[in-house]
Amino acid sequence: MKNYSYPIDLDWSTEEIVIVTEFLAAVEQANESHIDKLKFMTKYQLFKSVVKGIGAEKRLGKEFEKLSGFSIYRTVQAAEKSTRKVFSV
C-alpha cells in the first residue's frame, strides 16, 4: 500500500470514515495482490451504505483513482465476475 490520503467527506461520522477507508484498502489489496471475494463484497455493501447514489460513488471513485491509480468500478466488476473464492485484478 502506498502512502497517500484517501478521499473522505468531512460530513461522515467516524464509523462511516472507517467503513469507506476499509473498502478503499480492500480495493488496493485486490489490485496489489488478492483478496477474499466475500470479504471484499461485504466491504463494498457497507461502503454503499455510506456512499449513496451512483453520482457520489463516481466522484469518490475518480478521486481515489487519481490518487492511487486503482479503479473502484473495475475492481468491483472483477469481483462480481470472478468465480473464485479469492480474486485479484
Image (cartoon, rainbow, N blue to C red):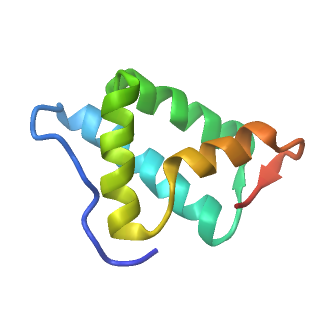
Whether residue 39 sits left or right of residue 51 in the image: it is right
Residue positioned most to the bottom: 2
Residue 58 point in image, percent of width and height: 38, 39
- x 52%, y 62%: residue: 28
Q: Is residue 31 above or below residue 79?
A: below
Front in this rendered view, residue 77 or 4 = 77
Whether residue 6 sits left or right of residue 35 in the image: it is left
Front in this rendered view, residue 56 or 47 = 56
In the rendered view of the protein, which quadrant contains the C terminus? bottom right
Q: Is residue 55 above or below residue 89?
A: above
Residue 34 point in image, percent of width and height: 71, 62
- x 41%, y 61%: residue: 65
Quarter where residue 39 is shown: top right
- x 36%, y 49%: residue: 21
* Number of marks in the rendered image: 0
Q: Is residue 22 above or below residue 66?
A: above
Front in this rendered view, residue 83 or 56 = 56
Whether residue 30 sits left or right of residue 52 in the image: it is right
- x 40%, y 27%: residue: 54
